[in-house]
Image (cartoon, rainbow, N blue to C red):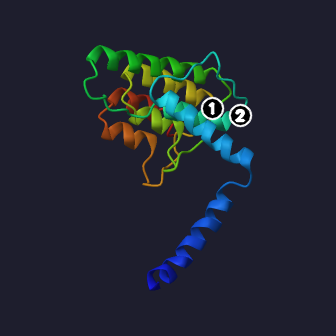
Amino acid sequence: MNIYLKLMPFILATSVLSGCAYSSEKDFFDSDRKKAQCDHAMYGKLDTSLFDSGDPQFNSYVFACSLAIVVPLPNESRISVKNRIKRKLEIADFLMTKNMDVSYKDETDSTLLMTVIISFMPDEWKLDTAKVLIQKGCDVKAKNSYGKTAIILARNREDFEMVSFLSKYLD
């Protein structure tokens, strides 16, 4: 009985907070839809012919999802992994043609430019994408919650071509 009384504040707080997280049933389903779109992009399964979002913030979120690292599945062939990476690049390129919020930051305050730099996508694709993001107005000097800028992340990854490119924007 005492354990139930001790847990009661936690249970009440959880139920109240969960009620605050979703203000309506529509928000709940929108949240599920957004998570599903992110998962599809992350695993290279987003159907771009059906994707239609006029929300620049959401497009940026799904773009970041498409760059997320996904470890190979057990018994997954190298060809399958290469095909998945190729598909993820196609999804990211598709989203780059959409209206994106270049000021978007993820939960670590990393910009889309930072997300591109730390992704495991091919270097030439990263550089081309960084150019487009900067042309669209992505902040090269922004810091994430760890105090890192895009150029610091590029240096840490020893991507000297990216460092050279980004240094032009630091004046």
Q: Amino acid at mark 1?
A: Asn
Q: Secondary structure at mark 1?
A: helix
**Residue 92 location (% of width, % of height):** 52, 23
Direction from residue 165 to residue 13 in the image, left or right: right
Decide if residue 103 is in sight here: no
Decide if residue 79 is in sight here: yes
**Residue 161 location (% of width, % of height):** 36, 26
Residue 12's mark?
none
Residue 30, above or below 9: above
**Residue 109 location (% of width, % of height):** 52, 49
Q: Quadrant of residue 153?
A: top left
Q: Which residue is mark 2?
A: 55
Q: Residue furthest front?
A: 1
User: Is label 2 in contact with label 1 (beta carbons under 8 Å)?
Assistant: yes
Residue at 31 percent of width and 29 percent of height: 73
Q: Between marks 2 and 1, how big is the CA–CA gap?
A: 6 Å
Residue 141, above or below 122: below
Q: Amino acid at mark 2?
A: Asp
**Residue 61 location (% of width, % of height):** 58, 37
Q: Which residue is mark 1?
A: 59
- 22 and 8: which is toward the camera: 8
Q: Secondary structure at mark 2?
A: loop
Residue at 50 percent of width and 45 percent of height: 110
